[in-house]
Image (tube, rainbow, N blue to C red):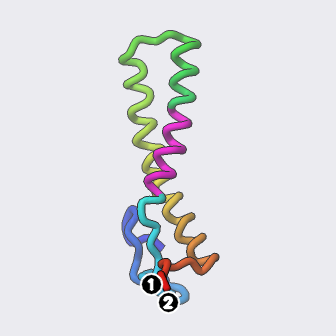
Amino acid sequence: MFDGYISLKKQCPACALDYAMFDAGDGPAVFGILIVGAIVCGLALYVEFSFLPPLWVHAVLWIPLICLLTAIFLRLSKSALLVLQYKHKAGEGRME
């Protein structure tokens, strides 16, 4: 489905489905921000109130975790939105 990290191939190599009709837009980024933000904020609050670490510990813990989770959720959410678009035959809205 993917040609690179999040760029789509032109078509499916197995069934020749044209991927040009799919467009996830900004949805994957929004889902990534919301999911990663909720996870990291919850963990950061737990660590802060349980252990009272200095600020540099938070930076060392959360910056790499944010980068890793964002990379994972961006691709995952983009593929999920594209599959949902295909399943529900969603297309561009038309004003008539």
- State the extent of the magenta-drawn residues as a range: 28-40
Callout 1: helix, strand or loop? loop
Determine the residue located farthest toward the bottom in the rendered image. Answer: 16
From the viewer's perspective, tell me whether residue 63 is left or right of residue 34. Answer: left
Q: CA distance from mark 1 to mark 2?
A: 5 Å
Horizontal and vertical percent for residue 91?
Answer: 51, 79
Which residue does the image show at 49% across and 38% down from the upper left? 37
| Along the viewing direction, whichever of 49 and 30 lies nearer the viewer | 30
The first of marks 1 and 2 along the sequence is 1
> Foreground: 14 or 38?
38
Would residue 18 appear left or right of 4 to someone viewing this image? Answer: right
Residue at left offset 57%, top offset 64%: 80
Say which amino acid is labelled 1: Gln
Q: Which residue is mark 1?
A: 11
**Residue 39 lies in the magenta-colored region:** yes
Place residue 67 in its image quadrant. Answer: top left
Circle 2 residues within 10 Å: few <14, some 14–19, many ≥20: few
Disc 1 to disc 2: CB gap under 8 Å: yes
Q: Name the spot of residue 62 as percent of width and height, x first.
A: 43, 30
Which amino acid, mark 2? Answer: Ala
Q: Position of residue 51 (x, y in %)?
A: 54, 11
Give the residue at mark 2: 16
